[in-house]
Image (cartoon, rainbow, N blue to C red):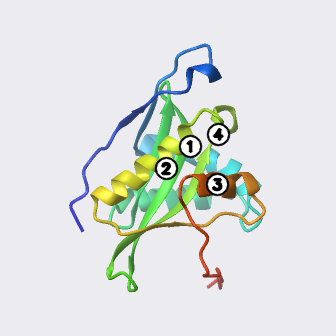
Amino acid sequence: MKTMQPRITAIVTPDRQLTDTPMTAVVDFATEADLPALADLLYELFTLESDFQPERDKQLRGLKLILDNPALGRLFVLRVDGRVAGMANALITLSTALGEPVVLLEDVIVAAPWRGRGWGRQLIEHVCAWARAQGMARVTLLADRGNAPALAFYERLGFQKSAMVVRRKML
């Protein structure tokens, strides 16, 4: 795996038809100062997903573990005019099938007021470009089977259905 760069930033410009006010969105690595806002986003996300319940202390603990251990993954943040508006969690693992490192993309969300402006697409494209630059061979993600808008969104971005089925066992 290639050495991780300390910062990757992309300027995202919204479709001018969607807003009268020009806004600037930046995708960057999250910082410790972002953790409360990321926990707020996870609250919003986990109220949409049937498998998870929002528990702020647990979410903050998990976010801090990722932030403090970049070998585990990277937290990406979407900022609109300096305010946190979205996030993605790129966890790093290894595929024995491919014999290479891969990313498990989790916790992708753009806050409701910022949706429909193309920033979710830019966020995911940014994470995929980062993963490619780090030598990752694949990005895999999971989405709630009942979240038709998210599933259609990921399909438009080139994510394909897998024949694999998710099973989990709590320890």
- Seen from this angle, which residue lies furthest left? 3
Along the polypeptide, which appears first: circle 1 or circle 4?
4
Return the mark for residue 56. 3
Please, is residue 24 above or below residue 101 in the view?
Answer: above
**Label 4: few (<14), some or many (≥20) within 10 Å?**
some
| Amino acid type at image mark 1 | Gly
Instruction: Compute the Cα span from label 4 to label 2.
Output: 14 Å
| Amino acid type at image mark 2 | Ile
Q: Are marks 1 and 4 in contact (CB under 8 Å)?
A: no
| Amino acid type at image mark 4 | Ala
Instruction: Compute the Cα span from label 1 to label 4.
Output: 10 Å
Q: Secondary structure at mark 1?
A: helix
| Residue at (40% x, 85% y) in the render | 97
The x, y position of residue 153, in whole percent, is 63, 51
Instruction: Compute the Cα span from label 3 to label 2.
Output: 24 Å
| Residue at (51% x, 52% y) in the render | 88
**Label 1: few (<14), some or many (≥20) within 10 Å?**
many
Residue at the spot of label 2: 124
The x, y position of residue 9, in whole percent, is 34, 38
Along the polypeptide, which appears first: circle 3 or circle 4?
3
Q: Secondary structure at mark 2?
A: helix
Q: Secondary structure at mark 3?
A: helix
